[in-house]
Image: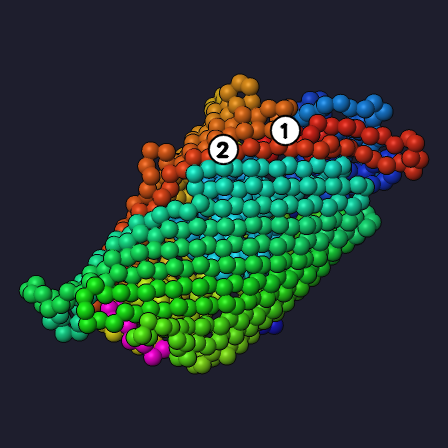
């Protein structure tokens, strides 16, 4: 351990020394209000060469007014500092000769004339490629309006989503999800349900972090997806609401924000309902006994209704105690539930290899299931900055509590005499509590080297009970003590990290670090023994700007995937007695090595192209595996003709792939397309290696008509893929949307249509094992039509206080403007 740490420190020190010997200069400073000294954020800093009227470099000030314009060759320059409501400041003859040229404190004087209705239009790129992440700006996504988070994720490069809402990042489902950079218990019981409970209207952007640095938790072999919700940082009071009505989904949300001087608060509430839909299924399984002298076929044809409800609410505040001390607090309450019912006709036949019929058993199964989850999250974040630019200390406390329950009942009645009806009623209540305390410190040691370090502790406890009643011969249900038990589980993770951001040989921008985590796990379930383990997680990224418009980067990260609640829960789901699933409390963490190479090119006309290639190697790979049993005893009850599905640590998995993204504006048209190609190879001891190739294609086209009318079309196709035991089905869909803005772009009305000419998406999944083969057809309703209405209200004020209240300057602006800057991408 000590050896690794010493090598890391030595490596970072060498990089710092090398970078200091050959680096371009930079221009730094801080922008403040001349009257009261408060920082001016989002001020525009532009650097001009002598005699030029166009800046060749520039940046915006951060929330504390600080800025740093990097990569400035030696020479003399003109620098301007400009922001709405202030007089532009120009500094001549700024001499740069390596190192840091400090402009110090720049005080902007307020204009003496009130501004009315000033609108500055700027367009943010839909996809931004940064050194440590890729950002998809979702604010102007028309086809997702009135939808949920899943609808936005379908359009994000490198991400694929199946028909059930299961998400993969670069072909891996082992993803760590965050909301505003923090964990949330809303993802605990069912990730798919949670993502279908977050309205798209609440989402500002999606951050995709495929090679997380040392500051991030090592959990998630596939990477991290951070959902950034919309916020407000402007003076005054304002808000918005969104309403959507449709044939499959209805939702609504309201936001209220207020900020006065150094204190701001926000409140939001959103709810959605997926209307009752009916799915049709057909399952065909053929199985063999050990001597292969008997064949059993099972035919299941049925339908089921499904309905989902959910809501989210939250309250947050931000208090700037002083120019160096800031506190952010948030409280959230979320709930979602779903209910399903179904009827299945079943025919089970036993035959000889020659086709002679030994038995023919007909039955009818009726089932009902419902589940619910309520979660509460709260956090408190204290950040302290120092006089030294970039030096800061942050302390974050986050806690979440979730209660969840699932209830299912199924009864199987035989249509011929001599066979007793079977039935099960199961109830699975529980709760999950997680607390995180983190301390992070950042120090720009020199002009070309920044040090980050920190520590974190994560405490998680999970408890649930399994209560099962079985049907007796007299038609009554009685508790089954052999299928009634409790499962208590706790996990503690202690972590420290060290990371450095540097320049190397005046050629690379880089970041390298090491994270150490100690995991201690305890479970009281019989036969479970999970030893503690240590994790050393190195990571690095090197980036090089080929010129001002193109860059390339290479990254590596060591990741682990700890099993979650659904993986560990030993509860047997017997809603279908012929297809049973359960968790595995003895699962070990999956280990991943991720490599990535990314090229990005921007063009003067606004076009953008990004290509990313990846290679991933996982050991102790966690996968679901199905085993066929002619007869199996679970808790004292015998079940026949059963496929049991359970997750195991199965050998290793290798993944390699390529993602291509392009965006091209053509007048009032904008075209975006994403192509993802990938191949996975599973190697399992005792089984033949399996290689499967898959691809994903999507195309997005939008057109802006006169009169603030915009149209958009989006289509997506995910191919099928061979996996360890069969094939995963492919599917395609397309969406059409229109939006009309009015009332000075403060209101809009839109219509959406998904798969308008096809009511169902049909998918066939195949599974096979040593003694069975199975094919399952599902017809999932997907066609929908919807109408969306949104409106922004309230008056924003650009206000800078002076000591003399009578001389206060107030600048009223249009609704919806962020400090007087209207960003069309957020409308």
The image quarter containing residue 138 is top right
Front residue (pair 548, 96) = 548
Q: Does residue 652 appear in the picture of this structure? A: no
From the viewer's perspective, is 350 left or right of 155? left
Give the class, few, some or many, for how many residues have Cα within 10 Å of label 1's Cα (few <14, many ≥20).
Answer: some
Q: Secondary structure at mark 2?
A: strand
Give the distance between the C-alpha atoms of the residues marked 1 and 2, in whole angstroms. 17 Å
Please report the residue visible at 71 percent of the width from the left and 33 percent of the height from the top: 794
| Residue bearing the label numbered 1 | 746
Residue 791 on the magenta segment: no
Q: Is residue 64 left or right of residue 471?
A: right
Residue occupying the point 44% across, 59% down: 370
The image quadrant that residue 122 belongs to is top right
Disc ID at residue 518: none
At 77% across and 49% down in the image, what residue appears?
319
Q: Where are the magenta residues, as a range?
A: 635-647
Q: Quadrant of the N terminus?
A: bottom right
Could you tell whether 802 is left or right of 22 in the image? right
Would you say the magenta stretch is mainly helix, strand or loop?
strand
| Camera-side mark, 1 or 2 | 2
**827 in relation to 20, above or below:** above
Does 51 appear above or below 174? above
Residue 638 inside the magenta-drawn segment: yes
- Can residue 814 be seen? yes
Q: Residue furthest bottom?
A: 527
Of residues 215 and 756, the one drawn nearer to the viewer in this rendering: 756
Residue position for label 2: 787
Image quadrant in which the C terminus is located: top right
Which sits in the foreground, 505 or 462?
462
Q: Does residue 541 lie above or below 549 as drawn?
A: below
């Amino acid at each position: 351990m000590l050896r690794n740490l010493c090598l890391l420190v030595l490596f970072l020190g060498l990089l710092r020394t090398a970078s200091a010997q050959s680096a371009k200069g930079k221009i730094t400073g801080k922008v403040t209000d001349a009257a009261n000294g408060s920082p001016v954020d989002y001020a525009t800093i532009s650097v001009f060469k002598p005699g030029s009227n166009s800046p060749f470099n520039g940046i915006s000030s951060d929330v504390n007014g600080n800025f740093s314009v990097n990569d400035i060759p030696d020479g003399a320059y003109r620098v301007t500092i400009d922001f709405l409501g202030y007089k532009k400041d120009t500094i001549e003859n700024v001499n740069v000769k390596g190192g840091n040229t400090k402009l110090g404190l720049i005080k902007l004087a307020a204009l003496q004339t009130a501004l009315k209705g000033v609108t500055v239009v700027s367009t943010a790129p839909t996809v931004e490629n940064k050194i440590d992440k890729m950002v998809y700006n979702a604010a102007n996504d028309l086809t997702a309006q009135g939808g949920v988070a899943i609808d936005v994720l379908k359009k994000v490069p490198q991400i694929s989503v199946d028909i059930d809402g299961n998400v993969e990042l670069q072909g891996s489902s082992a993803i760590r999800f965050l909301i505003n950079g923090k964990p949330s218990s809303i993802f605990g019981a069912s990730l798919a349900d949670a993502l279908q409970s977050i309205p798209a209207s609440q989402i500002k952007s999606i951050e995709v972090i495929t090679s997380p640095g040392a500051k991030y938790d090592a959990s998630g072999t596939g990477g991290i997806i951070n959902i950034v919700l919309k916020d407000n940082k402007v003076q005054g009071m304002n808000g918005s609401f969104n309403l959507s009505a449709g044939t499959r989904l209805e939702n609504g949300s309201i936001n209220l924000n207020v900020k006065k001087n150094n204190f701001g608060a926000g409140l939001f509430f959103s709810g959605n309902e997926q209307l009752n839909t009916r799915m049709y299924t057909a399952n065909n399984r053929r199985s063999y006994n050990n001597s292969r002298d008997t064949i059993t076929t099972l035919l299941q044809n049925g339908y089921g209704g499904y309905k989902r409800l959910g809501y989210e609410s939250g309250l947050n505040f931000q208090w700037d105690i002083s120019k160096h001390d800031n506190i952010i607090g948030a409280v959230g309450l979320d709930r979602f539930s779903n209910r399903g019912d179904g009827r299945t006709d079943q025919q089970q036949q036993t035959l000889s290899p020659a086709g002679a019929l030994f038995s023919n058993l007909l039955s009818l199964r009726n089932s009902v299931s419902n589940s619910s989850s309520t979660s509460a999250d709260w956090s408190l974040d204290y950040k302290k900055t120092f006089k030294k630019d970039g030096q800061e200390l942050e302390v974050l406390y986050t806690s979440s509590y979730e209660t969840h329950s699932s209830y299912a009942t199924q009864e199987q009645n035989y249509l011929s005499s001599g066979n007793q009806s079977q039935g099960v009623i199961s109830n699975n209540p529980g709760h999950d509590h997680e607390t995180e305390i983190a301390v992070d410190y950042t120090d720009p040691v020199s002009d070309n080297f920044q040090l980050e370090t920190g520590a974190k502790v994560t405490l998680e406890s999970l408890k649930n009970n399994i209560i099962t009643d079985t049907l007796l011969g007299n038609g009554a249900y009685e508790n089954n003590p052999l299928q009634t038990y409790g499962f208590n589980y706790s996990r503690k993770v202690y972590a420290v990290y060290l990371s450095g951001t540097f320049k190397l040989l005046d050629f690379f921008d880089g970041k390298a670090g090491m994270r150490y985590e100690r995991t201690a796990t305890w479970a009281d379930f019989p036969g479970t023994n999970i030893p503690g383990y240590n994790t050393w997680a190195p990571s690095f990224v090197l980036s090089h700007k080929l010129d001002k418009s193109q860059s390339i980067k290479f990254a590596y990260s060591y990741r682990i995937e700890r099993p979650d609640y659904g993986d560990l829960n030993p509860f047997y789901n017997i809603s279908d007695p012929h297809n049973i699933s359960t968790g595995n409390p003895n699962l070990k963490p999956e280990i991943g090595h991720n490599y990535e190479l990314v090229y990005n090119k921007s063009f003067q006309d606004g076009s953008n192209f990004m290509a990313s290639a990846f290679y991933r190697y996982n050991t102790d790979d966690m996968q679901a595996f199905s085993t066929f049993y002619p007869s199996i005893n679970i808790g004292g009850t015998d079940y026949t003709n059963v496929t049991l599905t359970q997750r195991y640590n199965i050998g290793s998995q290798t993944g390699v792939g390529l993602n291509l993204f392009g965006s091209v504006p053509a007048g009032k048209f904008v075209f975006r397309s994403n192509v993802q190609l990938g191949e996975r190879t599973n190697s399992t001891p005792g089984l033949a290696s399996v290689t499967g190739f898959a691809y994903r294609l999507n195309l997005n086209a939008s057109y802006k008509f006169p009169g603030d009318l915009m149209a958009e079309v989006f289509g997506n196709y995910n191919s099928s893929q061979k996996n360890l035991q069969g094939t995963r089905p492919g599917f395609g869909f397309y969406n059409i949307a229109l939006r009309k803005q009015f009332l000075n772009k403060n209101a809009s009305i839109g219509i959406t249509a998904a798969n308008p000419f096809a009511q169902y998406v049909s998918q066939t999944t195949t599974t096979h094992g040593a003694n069975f083969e199975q094919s399952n057809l599902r017809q999932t309703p997907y066609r929908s039509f919807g109408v969306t209405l949104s409106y922004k209200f309230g008056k924003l004020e650009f206000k800078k206080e002076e000591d003399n209240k009578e001389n206060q300057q107030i600048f009223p602006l249009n609704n919806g403007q962020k400090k007087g800057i209207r960003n069309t991408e957020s409308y």
